Amino acid sequence: MQRYLFDKGFFNAQASYRLDTLRGRQIRVNYRVNERAGYYLRTVTYNIADPRVDSLVRQSLDRAAVKVGNRFDLDAISAERVRIETQLRDQGYYAFTRQYVQFGDVDTIRRATDRLATDSLHRPVDVSLTVLNPPGMAAHPVYRIGAVDVRISPDETQPAAFVSQPDTVTRNGVLYLLNGRNLSSRLLDNKILLRPGDLYSQIKYRETQRQLFLLNQFKFVNLNFTDTTSRRLQTLITATPLDKYEATAEGGLTVLYQAQSYPGGFGSLSFRARNLLGGLETFELTGRYGLEAQTGFLTAPGASKQVYTSQELGISSSLIFPQILFPGPLRNRFNPYNPRTQVSLSYNNTLRPDFRRSLLRGTMAYSWQTTTNKQFSFLIADVNLINANFDTDLGRLFEQQLDSLANLGSTIKLSFRRSLSSSISFAYTYNNNAPGISQGGLRRPTNFLRTVVESGGTTLNFLPNRLIDTANTNLQFYKFLRFNVDFRHYIPLRNRAMLAFRINTGVAYGYGPDGGPVPYEKLFFVGGSNSVRAWLPRRLGPGAAYPYLANSPNRPAIDPNTEQFIYLFEQPGNVLLEGSAEVRGRLFHLGADINGAFFIDAGNVWTLRNNNSTRPGATFQLDSFFPQIAVGTGVGLRIDFSFFVIRLDGGIKVWDPARRYFDSENRLVDDRFILPKFSLRQLSRGPNPLVINFGIGYPF
């Protein structure tokens, strides 16, 4: 303890202990620590013999880890040595190491008249850093890049074994020995940042290696430098390609879930071809088939069949290019940012006992990454053709049920329209949480921000409404705008404990010719394992609206046995506002980290237009939305295997905005503060039941 305090600037600190004898031959240890006054930096002196090094270091003192006025900290001194080493190695000093930066003895004796010398809590200290020259040399040597060779190795076990006459291409002074591989030297050249004649740069060395790895074309990438007498670094980049063709298979078994299905199987087969067209692109083709026996559907009167078969068949393909496919020189500006162009086409067919639904989707997207924390994605085309019908065993009954739900305010039937939905979108993601760090292992506060702006049916604005009328084309078109922001903030409390916050908001606005519908998949939903966890998935909202029965639209639908609302369908909305706060911490380790959590969730969705007069309180209004925000709380248990997290969360309602209504005797009932109605004796049957959510991964 005394040594630690000394390294943190408390030079006169004292640590001692006292032993107390207890019963049972036990001893209690009492540690006594007196840190005394801390020493703060009065002056920081740099003694650098090499004039050029001295100039470079002094130009960057604004980024120094040690500054006048800060308390003395040996860790800060070490960080400054690393900073100087990093800076110089990026300026051509290939052989420079932090061992040349020496930290001299501190001076605590020299007097001064400043505040640090007179303050009883602040003692002055003077420190000096000396940058030595190499033994027997008047200055540090500066290195430049010499010849640069890029060799494609056929075998990682024999990287030096090449064919007798390898393919040779020269671009921008870099020699490419392709060894018979049909690889684009132009695209490879965009990833090579080391050029003959340039000063050696450690950043360019690491970025070159990273860019080549991100191509997903090579198993290994090695960069080797050979020092010559003229201080020219002969550079050899050796890359070992991955297999050109790769196939993977996956299978699984569905399990019984809430008595809704019998076990069934599914399988998928994926095929990947690298460098298919010689441009370092990757082609992927995946097929999936699933078969499941299910119960719980509507049945015809007198029918004896209780188990039905549900099938799903899907196939998807994509071609990924390591560049921005765009005419003109603009695409070259993205070369340093790991650009990607992905063209995809997929088809999915679902055959259930109650409906058939098929989806044909085509997309084209650009993505790039300016830094390790900032990612951009531009979806320039997303076209979806949806077709559904009820020509199945239970199709007629299911269609009747959808019509009944529509009379209750449900919009789920919209997802079964024959429709064409097209959109463009732009997304920005910022994430400064280092990959591979578990939620409990953070060392500093981190943030995550994702913003998405989407415009649907934009090209339809150039056509008259009569040409896109649903009645004439028998096809539903959509024109809409959608905006979504998801922000998360993580604060470490102590080792393996943290605070996590999330705010998620969005707006979806439709402006089509027939009332402006928004595609069902583009609406917002609240409730479930990654939302307000005290409500069932997608069952919260909209606003203060409550579920009601068809024969009594002015009365809520309440189960008389449990006093719970009867939610028969999902509750979509055009406006989303939700937030969560969660305390996470490790409980113990048993094969995996067993973590606990306490959370508070709040949020709701609203409609933008009052299309259904029988659902008051569903429309978003600035003067009334605040008391319509639902609140839930609960605890969670997480089994963290580091690479895989199994999560169980139990939530209860605190504030339910829908619990304000008139009963059968026309009396106003206001049970919005519903927390007192939670009872351990009625975990599942009371008016405020415990809602269990199962999830994979953390909720946010």
Image: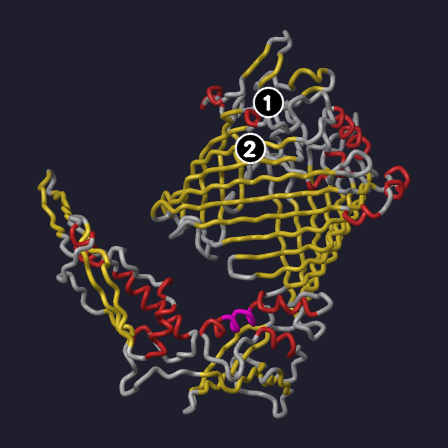
Residue visible at 52% across and 23% down in the picture: 688
Up the image or down, 506 lies above or below 249; here it is above
Q: Position of residue 559 (x, y in %)?
A: 61, 19
Q: Amino acid at mark 2?
A: Gly
Task: Write down the quadrant of residue 542 in the picture.
Answer: top right
Q: Nearer the viewer, residue 486 or 658?
A: 486
Q: Which residue is mark 2?
A: 603
| Residue closest to the far top | 665
Up the image or down, 133 lies above or below 230; here it is above
Q: Position of residue 51 (x, y in %)?
A: 33, 79
Up the image or down, 535 lies above or below 234; here it is above
The boundaries of the magenta stretch are: 207-213
Residue visible at 61% across and 89% down in the picture: 163
Residue visible at 48% across and 54% down in the picture: 432
Q: Nearer the viewer, residue 666 or 266?
A: 666
Residue visible at 46% across and 85% down in the picture: 233
Q: Which residue is mark 1?
A: 658
Q: Position of residue 403 (x, y in %)?
A: 78, 28
